[in-house]
Amino acid sequence: MKTKTLKKNKVNVVTLGCSKNIFDSEVMMSQLKANKFDVHHESNDGEASTVIINTCGFIDNAKQESIDTILGWADAKKNGEVDKVMVTGCLSERYKDELAGEIPEVDAWFGTRELPRLLKTLKADYKHELVGERLLTTPVHYAYFKIAEGCDRPCAFCAIPLMRGKHVSTDMDQLVNNAKNLAANGTKELILIAQDLTYYGLDIYKKRNLSELMARLAEIEGIDWIRLQYAYPSGFPMDILDAMNKYDNVCKYLDMPLQHASSKMLKSMKRGINREKTDALIKSIREKVPGIALRTTLITGFPGETEEDFQEMLEWIKETRFERLGCFTYSHEENTSAHALVDDVPQEVKQDRANQIMALQSGISMELNQAKIGKTYKVLFDRVEGDYFIGRTQYDSPEVDNEVLVHNEDGFARIGDYANVEVTDAEEFDLFGKIV
C-alpha cells in the first residue's frame, strides 16, 4: 500500500558500473529533461514515480550488484514506493530475456543502444538537436568524455563487445563542439573514455586519429586538463605522446590496462602482445614523456594461470613500479572465447593472488608518495569532507587514484579551482599538504 503520493513526472536514474555508464546516464537525463521530466540522479527523497536503473554486466561482482539493485527496486514497487521500474545498460543488453522471466516487477528492459525506445516507452521524444548534450552527474569542473562506443578487440575474457557492439568512433567535429559546450558551462577537465581510445578514428578516418583529436581539444579555451583512460597496448599510437608533450593541458597520465605479464597468459588472453613488447612499450612511453603516471589493471586467475605465471607477474610489478595499479579476479563469462577453457584456478586462490598484488602495489605507492614530500603540485579540488579540502594532481583520475588532502587550517580551496599545494606528508594512496 502506498504511503505517500508519488510525483508522476519525476524520474530517478540509478547508475552502476564504469564511467561509460555515467556518460550514458547523463545523456539519458538530458533527453528526459528536454521532455519536461523532473529527472534526478540517485535521489533518496522517495518521490519519483519511475526509476531507471543503468546496469553493469562486466564481471560477476558487477552483475550481482546490478541484480541486487534491480531486486531492491522491484521490492519498492511491490510496496508502493515507486510506480515503474525500468532497466537499461550492459546487464540488460546481455540477459534481458532471462531476467524478464525472473523479475516480472520490472516494467521494461532496454539494451545499451536503445535510448530512443526507452524514451518512447515513457511517451517522450528523442531530441536529435540534443546530441552531445548531457546533465552532468559529476561536479561541473570535470566530465567524462566518451569518444567512441563498442570494441573490436578479441580479448578472450571480455564480454564488452557482446554488450556494447563493434567499435564506432564519434565524429571529431561533433566531439569538439561538445567539448566547447562543456567548457562554456564551467568544465575544466575532460576525461577521455572509450573501450579503446587508441582505436579512435580507424572506422571513419581510416587511421588512428586520437592525437589529432587531442590537439583540437587542447586548443579549446577553458579546458585546462585532458586525461586519457583505457588505452590498448597492441598497436599503441606513439604520436599521442607527442601531443602530451606539446600541450600543457594534456595530463601526463595514461591508463593502459595490461592484464598480465606472462607471455603465455597474454597469448591465451588474446591480447595481441607479449611480455617483451609490453616492456619495450612501457620503456618508450616513460622515455618519451618523463614523469608520466602510468595506470594499469591486471587480472589474476585466468584459466591456466600457474603459480609460476603469477610469480612472474609479481616480479614484473616490482621491476616496473607502476604509479597506479588496480587488480580484479577473473570472471568466467559465457559466450567469451575464454569460456571454452576450464576455469581451473579456485576463487580463493584468485583472490589471494589479487590481495598479494595490491599489497605489493601499496608498498610501491607508499615509496613513490613519500618521495613527493616537500614538492609542490598543482591541485584541482573536487570536494570538501569534514575538515579537509580534497583534490587531485594531473597524475590522478577521480574515484580510482590518489587524492590530495588539505586541512582547513592549512589553506582555503574553492571547489572546482586549482591551487598549488606543498606536500607535507604521504600515505599509501593519499597526499597531505598546505596551500602555498
Image (cartoon, rainbow, N blue to C red):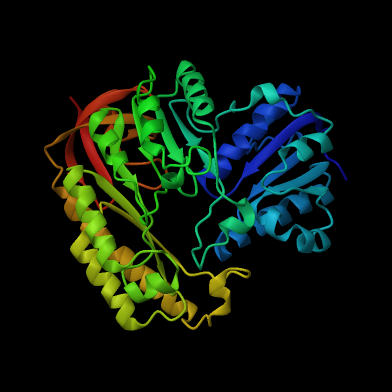
In the image, farthest residue toward the front:
206
Residue at image position (28%, 67%) is: 275
Q: Residue farthest to the left?
A: 374
- The residue depicted at 20 percent of the width and 55 percent of the height is 283
**Picture mark count:** 0
Q: Nearer the viewer, residue 212 or 425?
A: 212
Using residue 134 as the reference point, say whether residue 424 is left or right of it: left
Would residue 178 be visible to someone looking at this image? yes
**Residue 373's quadrant in the figure?**
top left
Residue located 49% across and 77% down the image: 347
**Closer to the camera in the image, 43 or 219:** 219
With respect to residue 225, does 156 lie above or below? below
Measuring from the top left, give residue 304's x and y in whole percent. Answer: 43, 81
Look at the image and tell me in which quarter the N terminus lies.
top right
Please tell me which residue is depicted at 20% across the width and 49% down the height of the picture: 286
387 over 305 or under it: above or below = above
Horizontal and vertical percent position of residue 364: 21, 58
123 and 430: which one is in front? 123
Indicate the quadrant where residue 163 lies: bottom right
